[in-house]
């Protein structure tokens, strides 16, 4: 039965084949194996398969997978922090800051996106964007730029909010995938644009060693952006209404700017002055919510969004928690081939522990790795936090089949960007 389930997963999710490759001899541990693969990974793969097949019940599937994997680890294999319930408690105590920070960011940025939508700015943008397919492409470029100095979740949500307005909420599945890809690609070369690059910065890697990822990101943007823009323009062009009166609520614009400045300044301050505390407290999420609450007397957030935002966030956190319990003890030798594979793995496996392991191992070209693990999650909707955030707004994105079918240009952009970076810059491994 398990062999049939595993085979079905490989046929539907090609990236899982890469995960299985990494999980075999190079990730050996004391866990029981089936077909040379630790049973932990098979349970996680079955969970991901359930998410792929039952996209209308993803929260139930993810929580069920979390319970099963947790019970299995408690009863049989234990954790790095110890065995049994005590080991589980110690593991979750170590992970709580990351999980809670992600929860606060996802829910907070959902409220921020509504502030931006209600500001009236998205109604004005059709006047600024070009006509025909260049309009959708220009919007992807804006998202790409924003993600370089904002968190990629914020960039994706702001972009999706603008798109919802200018395309009258009629978004092609391929364009939804491109919004996520643009946000992930744009943050790959900036140490404040993505959690993984921030981790590299904290570990002592210079921002100049990561910035080369922009070569790959720019190539990828063109490769996936042009076909995605053509898809959207055929499906629903930008709606121009030059004669309509548009009122901009500058108070809400100021609130959005205030929240983003609070997030960016907190991120930079903590990483520069208190790097040893960065993983012990959810500073970024707390800053976003602090700014949100301070602004309540000026404009109240749309609190009615909280139930759905919380539901979508809990789903992502369940998958991240499952990933944190996987027995990823070591990676193959650092090489560009390994980095290429890690990009595919990151579409089904949380890129934060992958990046942490690569940092411990050392010997990578950090620009290549930043692009691989940052952009790679775009290949599936639940492969990155920005993808989950966008899917919370557009539920039609929660279909692996549609994402793969209509977002075919996303993996093509990954391969084109990756090899363009190798050819133009080369593989230049550096120690941490």
Image (spheres, rainbow, N blue to C red):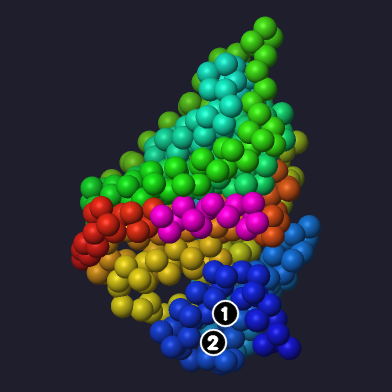
Residue 378: x and y, percent?
53, 54
Which residue is more in the foreground, 65 or 161? 161
Residue 143: x and y, percent?
49, 36
The local secondary structure at tag 2 comes to strand
Residue at image mark 1: 41
Residue 398 visible within the image: yes
Q: Main secondary structure of the magenta part?
A: helix
Q: Quadrant of residue 306?
A: top right
The local secondary structure at tag 1 comes to helix
Residue 95: x and y, percent?
50, 64
Q: Is residue 409 magenta?
A: yes
Crowd around label 1: few <14 · some 14–19 · many ≥20 (10 Å): many
Q: Quadrant of the N terminus?
A: bottom right
What is the span of residues highlighted in magenta in the rendered image?
403-416
> Would residue 407 be found to the left or right of residue 151 on screen?
right
Q: Is residue 349 magenta?
A: no
Q: Quadrant of residue 315?
A: bottom right
Q: Residue at x 37, y 57 (%)?
A: 418
Which residue is more in the foreground, 351 or 219? 219
Which residue is more in the foreground, 261 or 406? 406
- Image disc number at residue 78: none
Q: Relative to residue 279, is residue 225 depicted above or below?
A: above
Q: Are marks 1 and 2 in contact (CB under 8 Å)?
A: yes
Residue at image mark 2: 37
Q: Relative to residue 303, is residue 377 depicted above or below?
A: below
> Would residue 427 be found to the left or right of residue 375 on screen?
left
Q: Relative to residue 54, is residue 195 depicted above or below?
A: above
Q: Residue at x 70, y 37 (%)?
A: 235
């Amino acid at each position: 039965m398990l062999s049939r389930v595993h085979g079905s997963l490989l046929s539907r999710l090609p990236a899982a084949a890469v995960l299985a490759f990494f999980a075999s001899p190079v990730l050996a541990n004391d866990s029981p194996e089936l077909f040379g693969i630790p049973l932990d990974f098979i349970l996680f793969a079955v969970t991901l398969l359930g998410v792929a097949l039952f996209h209308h019940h993803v929260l139930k599937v993810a929580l069920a997978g979390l319970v099963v994997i947790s019970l299995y680890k408690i009863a049989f294999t234990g954790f790095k922090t110890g065995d049994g319930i005590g080991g589980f408690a110690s593991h979750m105590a170590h992970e709580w800051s990351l999980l809670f920070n992600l929860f606060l960011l996802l829910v907070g940025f959902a409220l921020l996106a509504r502030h931006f939508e209600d500001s009236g700015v998205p109604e004005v943008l059709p006047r600024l964007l070009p006509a025909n397919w260049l309009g959708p492409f220009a919007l992807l470029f804006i998202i790409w730029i924003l993600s370089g100095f904002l968190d990629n979740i914020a960039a994706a949500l702001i972009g999706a909010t603008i798109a919802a307005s200018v395309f009258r909420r009629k978004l092609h599945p391929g364009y939804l995938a491109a919004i996520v890809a643009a946000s992930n690609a744009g943050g790959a070369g900036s140490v404040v644009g993505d959690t993984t690059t921030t981790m590299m910065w904290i570990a002592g890697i210079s921002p100049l060693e990561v910035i080369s990822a922009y070569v790959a990101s720019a190539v990828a943007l063109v490769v996936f952006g042009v076909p995605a823009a053509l898809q959207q323009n055929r499906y629903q062009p930008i709606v121009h209404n030059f004669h309509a009166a548009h009122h901009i609520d500058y108070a809400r614009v100021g609130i959005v700017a205030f929240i983003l400045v609070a997030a960016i300044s907190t991120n930079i301050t903590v990483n520069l002055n208190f790097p040893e505390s960065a993983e012990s407290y959810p500073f970024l999420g707390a800053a976003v919510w602090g700014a949100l609450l301070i602004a309540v007397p000026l404009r109240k957030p749309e609190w009615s969004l909280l139930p759905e935002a919380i539901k979508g966030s809990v789903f992502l956190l369940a998958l991240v928690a499952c990933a944190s319990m996987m027995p990823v003890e070591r990676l193959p030798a650092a090489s560009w081939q390994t980095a290429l594979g890690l990009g595919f793995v990151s579409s089904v496996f949380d890129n934060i522990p992958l990046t942490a392991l690569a940092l411990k191992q050392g010997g990578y070209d950090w620009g290549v790795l930043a692009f691989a693990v940052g952009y790679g999650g775009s290949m599936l909707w639940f492969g990155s936090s920005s993808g989950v955030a966008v899917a919370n707004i557009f539920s039609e994105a929660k279909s692996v089949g549609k994402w793969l079918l209509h977002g075919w240009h996303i993996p093509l952009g990954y391969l084109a960007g990756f090899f363009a970076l190798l050819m133009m810059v080369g593989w230049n491994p550096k120690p941490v």
